[in-house]
Image (tube, rainbow, N blue to C red):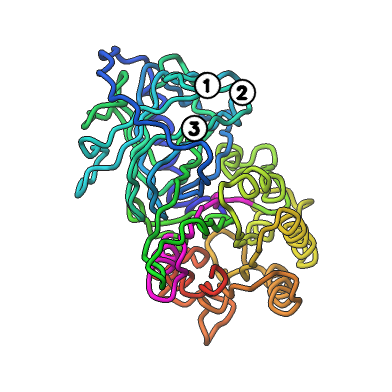
Amino acid sequence: MKHLTVRQRLSALLAGVLLLGGASLTPAASAAPASAPSAAPAASSAAWTGTWATAPTTVPRTDTTTFENQTIRQIVRTSIAGSALRVRLSNEFGKQALKLGDVHVARRAAGTADASIEPGTDRRLTFGGKSSVSIPAGAPALSDPVTLRVPARSDLVVSLHLPERTPGSTVNSFASQRNYVAAGNVTGETRIEPTSVTERWYFLTGVSVRATADRPSETGRSETGNASAVVALGDSITAGSTVDTNHRWTDYLTQRLQGPGGPRHPVGVLNKGISGNRLLHDPNPPAGNPAEAYAAYFGESGLKRFDRDVAAQPGARHLLVLIGVNDLGHPGTIAPLSEKVTGQDLIDGHRQLIARAHERGLRIYGGTITPFKNDTFGFSTPENEAARQTFNHWLRTSGEYDGVVDFDAALRDPAEPDQLLAAYDSGDHLHPNDAGREAMARAVPLRFFK
């Protein structure tokens, strides 16, 4: 999808960029706190399953956010429980090595709306046994395991200390989650005094766990050996939520998976949605278009990022795809008309996703493209609606996907099937509101994951 309500939120986004850029002007260093010792590493032979993930992008040239002797404290919501965890960091869009002085993880303090951590849960992460790490340009890094009880659907706090001047080059810019920047190395502090707040995740792309059961099995034994993850590949309809509420449709799906009728084994839910993302094309705003200031945040095409954002996810056995509306709507608005696609073009692209998923042994489920009549972004045209209908008909009838999720039917107005039901409309006639995202989660058949 196009990034969240461009006309209403772009100014706030750019203001956040400027705020962080100003906040990174080398504040006075605070003394590094005494670190809590790392817990004993979990057994290396354990199977790891993703409990949280996000998709990274690069930044436009206009984004000059930098950090220097600062701590970024970031909040993530788990999906499944675990007895140990490891964290994945990313410098995949960096042009220089990413040097981290300390990295800590902890449970968020109960009942808090800030970045305070629960006493006794702080863990210093190591990388090959070292507490600091230098991640080469273009590479990710996976931490050593640490023992920490991780409840399902709970908040973790990941704190990164950046001792040297570091561009904020690898980011998810539409986190729908407030995160915090503070002066100095305060990675191990219970409470911090932030110098700025951002709705982005920087350099952080995943948390995996040694899964523990969300509920006992019918035999009374846990079925954690069957733990798996479902990856949701999409755009802003997948990525979006009211800030700090964890109301993405994937969050609602997590609740359903752990409720009545859900599978007995843990199923992690990994949200790989990027606002503005397309299946077939990278961001490519025409020269002079205002989108040059933000299109880079839309991320590489779904086909290009498949191996990193889907196939490489720990424990992934399922893929749920909802992508294509930006392929229809961007050309002629914030992408060249030469990138105009047809319904058949979308079908061909989705067939590639199916082939690549099956090559990796993944079950793959396709989501119908949701309505967007009279949207405020200029997507709605008779030609684009015809292409949407062509694609949705193929998806429902071809049998090429392993299963279909009819998001279109879940959100459309029965009286006007080419537009969103008013009760599910965020106001821009393209993105669903929280109630609409909950309806989307209800449309996903739980039998896919049993």
Q: Which amino acid does the dot numbered 2 rest on?
A: Ala
- First in sequence: mark 1 vs mark 2: 1
Q: Position of residue 247 (x, y in %)?
A: 38, 60
**Which residue is denoted by mark 3 in the rendering?**
203
Q: Are marks 3 and 1 in contact (CB under 8 Å)?
A: yes
Q: Which stretch appears magenta?
A: 251-277
Residue drawn at point x = 61 percent, y = 59 percent: 319
Is residue 93 rendered to the left or right of residue 5? Answer: right
* Mark nearer the N terminus (3 vs 1): 1
Q: Residues at badges 1 and 2 in contact (C-beta under 8 Å)?
A: yes
Q: Disc 1 marks which residue?
A: 98
Q: Is residue 89 left or right of residue 303?
A: left
Using the image, determine if residue 25 lies above or below residue 52.
above
For the point 56% across and 33% down, the residue is 59
Q: Amino acid at mark 3?
A: Phe
Q: Nearer the viewer, residue 202 or 100?
A: 100
How far is the residue under mark 3 from the one under mark 1? 9 Å
**SS class, disc 2:** loop
**For residue 353, which quarter of the picture?**
bottom right
The 10 Å Cα crowd at callout 3, few under 14, some 14 to 19, many 20 or more, is many
Tell me, for residue 137, which label it has, or none. 2
**How busy is the neighbourhood of tag 1: few (under 14 within 10 Å), some, or many (20 plus)?**
many
Q: Earlier in the sequence, mark 2 or mark 3?
A: 2
In this rendering, is residue 356 above or below 66?
below
